[in-house]
Image (cartoon, rainbow, N blue to C red):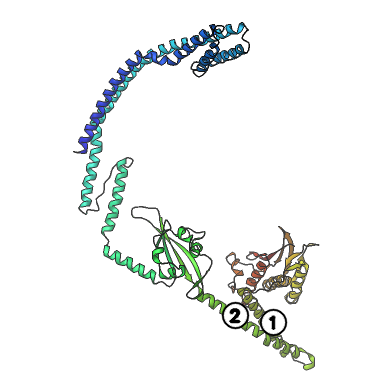
């Protein structure tokens, strides 16, 4: 049977039901008019209780049980309060009855009780009359409204009978024809209905389906299967552990490297929810800790015992997103956890650090011998030197000092990298730290005709620091300021207290540092483009490690052309 025929029969039946309902409603209302007396049940009960109470009141002196009967009828009346004013009258009746029980000889109380009962009866009789009149009016009104409603329903049903079958049947017929086209592999078939109707939504879904079918039909299933196997083989042969997740954190794939470090079998992890697996596997708990498939960040190196030795891995969580066919919004479909084995780089870095430390330590002895030989040559007891020889010795001395400084910085950096910094943190005076650094750089400042000013409070707080390391940092700041300040300028060393910390800063008026390099200057071996590359680029990196190891902070404020202000904080004792 066709849908149009079904709809016609359905609407016709609806029409018949509406007519039947209207007739039954009119008939029911007529019956309601005849049975109005049943509505008065609540008032009738009150009248019954009141009549019984009057009878019991008259028999109080004759029958001792009359008080109990009165009390029972009063209780029923108090539970049957339906009319305005009835509660107050019933409460007054209850109060007078309570007084009568206590004072049975009081002649006024029976009179008051009788008046209360009569008032309750009067209220209910008036209510009965009013309800009867209202029911009659309601019945007459209902006849009119039901007749009107029936006529409206008739018109609506007639309209639906004429229009609805065509409105529903025609789009369905068009959709059926389009489906036949899709069945015949004509995936370019599209349907177009009103956009704001249910058929518009159906058309959108149908068109999306047809578009995806068209895309799928243009692919080669065997090729897809081959590519899938190819990708799985590539992932499985990767030297780094790889774990693939879907958007619900279910494991989609895992290669042999990952299974090896996790200590799991493939069937024990594939298709499982990774947070649930992490409850029983410490390494998995570390891999997913604090991250979700939507994050993309590089985690700190993870130390894992793998391949028979302690290894180090860097974790990266890569979200996988696509734009589905026929849609515009990007959709997250999963993530990939990758672990990059950085153990060889860690070993090379450690070997480099040990080599630098060894070479630097071995160089200090010949450099010391060179400086001692210079001192002997500069002594008049060994003979007089001409001007050229003195200049040559001065140049050798400067190069020896610079070489000694470089070896010292390399030794300090090797201690930093191996975590072997020896700190002697104790209660220290800020003035001693500042004076040591100024004295160490006094000669260099005089050679460039620079004036070093100090701004120190009268009684600065004691700091908790290693005075030698802190003085080394301040000396490094002053040396850089001297190197980059214009001649006959000034350098200011300031000491101030901020938030229970002592701030020590060095202000110069050199060329300043571009904002692009203000954070990088504290990196190892970094030197600003265009600067005098006379050092190793380690001074500020070592300074940063020294200050942070003491629980302080280090930083710089600089404006190109106006100079720089290097500073560090040390905690107050």
- Disc 1 packing (10 Å; few <14; some 14–19; many ≥20): some
Q: Earlier in the sequence, mark 1 or mark 2?
A: 2
Q: Which residue is drawn at the image coordinates 22% and 33% (left, top)?
A: 8
The answer to whether residue 204 shows anywhere in this view is yes
Find residue 142 and report its horizontal and vertical position in percent.
Answer: 35, 17
Q: Nearer the viewer, residue 34 or 447?
A: 34
Looking at the image, residue 3 lies above or below residue 507: above
- Count of numbered tags: 2
Residue in the foreground of this view, choosing between 550 and 287: 287
Quadrant location of residue 537?
A: bottom right
Label 1: which residue?
Answer: 401
Residue situated in front as seen by the camera: 134 or 431: 134
Residue 38 location (% of width, % of height): 39, 15
Q: Is residue 58 above or below residue 497?
A: above
Residue extending furthest bottom? 383
Between 23 and 194, the residue placed more toward the observer is 23
Q: Is residue 73 left or right of residue 469?
A: left
Q: Is residue 143 left or right of residue 127?
A: left
Q: What residue sits 56% from the left and 9% below the top?
A: 113
Which numbered disc, 1 or 2, marks the residue closer to the eye? 2
Q: Position of residue 487 (x, y in %)?
A: 71, 73
For the C terminus, give its image quadrant.
Answer: bottom right
State whether residue 486 appears in this view. no
* SS class, disc 2: helix
Query: Where residue 561 appears, x then y in whole percent?
Result: 64, 66
* Quadrant placement of the N terminus: top left
């Amino acid at each position: 049977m066709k849908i149009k025929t079904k709809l016609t029969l359905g609407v016709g039946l609806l029409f018949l039901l509406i007519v039947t309902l209207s007739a039954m409603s009119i008939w029911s209302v007529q019956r309601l008019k005849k049975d109005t007396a049943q509505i008065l049940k609540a008032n009738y009960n009150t009248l019954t209780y009141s009549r019984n109470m009057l009878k019991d009141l008259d028999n109080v002196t004759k029958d001792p049980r009359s008080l109990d009967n009165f009390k029972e009828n009063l209780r029923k009346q108090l539970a049957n309060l339906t009319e305005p004013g009835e509660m107050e009258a019933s409460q007054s009746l209850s109060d007078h009855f309570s007084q009568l029980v206590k004072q049975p000889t009081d002649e006024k109380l029976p009179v008051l009780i009788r008046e209360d009962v009569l008032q309750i009866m009067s209220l209910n009789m008036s209510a009965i009359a009013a309800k009867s009149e209202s029911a009659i009016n309601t019945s007459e009104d209902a006849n009119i409204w039901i007749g009107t409603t029936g006529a409206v329903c008739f018109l609506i049903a007639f309209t639906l009978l004429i229009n609805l079958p065509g409105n529903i049947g025609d789009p369905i017929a068009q959709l059926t024809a389009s489906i036949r086209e899709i069945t015949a592999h004509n995936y370019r078939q599209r349907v177009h209905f009103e956009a704001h109707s249910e058929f518009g939504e159906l058309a959108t879904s149908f068109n999306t389906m047809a578009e995806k079918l068209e895309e799928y039909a243009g692919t080669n299933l065997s090729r897809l299967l081959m590519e899938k196997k190819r990708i799985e083989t590539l992932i499985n042969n990767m030297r780094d552990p790889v774990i693939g997740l879907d958007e619900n954190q279910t494991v989609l794939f895992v290669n042999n490297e990952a299974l090896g470090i996790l200590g799991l079998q493939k069937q024990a992890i594939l298709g499982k929810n990774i947070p649930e697996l992490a409850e029983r596997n410490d390494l998995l708990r570390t891999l997913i800790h604090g991250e979700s498939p939507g994050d993309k960040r590089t985690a700190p190196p993870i130390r894992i015992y793998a391949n028979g030795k302690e290894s180090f891995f860097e974790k990266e969580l890569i979200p996988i997103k696509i734009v589905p066919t026929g849609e515009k919004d990007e959709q997250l479909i999963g993530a990939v956890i990758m672990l990059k084995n950085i153990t060889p780089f860690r070993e090379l870095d450690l070997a480099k650090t040990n080599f630098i430390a060894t070479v630097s330590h071995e160089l200090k002895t010949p450099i010391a011998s060179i400086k001692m030989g210079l001192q002997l040559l500069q002594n008049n007891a060994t003979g007089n030197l001409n001007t050229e020889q003195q200049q040559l010795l001065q140049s050798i001395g400067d190069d020896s000092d610079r070489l000694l400084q470089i070896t010292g910085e390399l030794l300090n950096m090797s201690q930093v990298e191996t975590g072997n910094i020896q700190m002697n943190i104790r209660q220290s005076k800020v003035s001693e730290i500042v004076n040591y650094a100024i004295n160490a750089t006094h000669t260099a400042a005089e050679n460039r005709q620079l004036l070093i000013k100090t701004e120190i409070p009268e009684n600065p707080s004691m700091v908790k620091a290693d005075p030698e390391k802190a003085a080394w940092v301040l000396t490094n700041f002053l040396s850089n300021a001297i190197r980059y300040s214009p001649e006959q300028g000034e350098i200011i060393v300031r000491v101030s207290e901020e938030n229970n910390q002592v701030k020590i800063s060095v202000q110069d008026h050199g060329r300043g540092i571009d904002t692009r390099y203000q954070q990088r200057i504290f990196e190892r071996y970094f030197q600003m483009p265009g600067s005098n590359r006379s050092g190793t680029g380690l001074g500020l990196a070592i300074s940063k490690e020294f200050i942070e190891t003491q629980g302080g902070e280090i930083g710089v404020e600089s404006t190109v052309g106006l100079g720089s202000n290097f500073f560090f904080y040390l905690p107050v004792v």
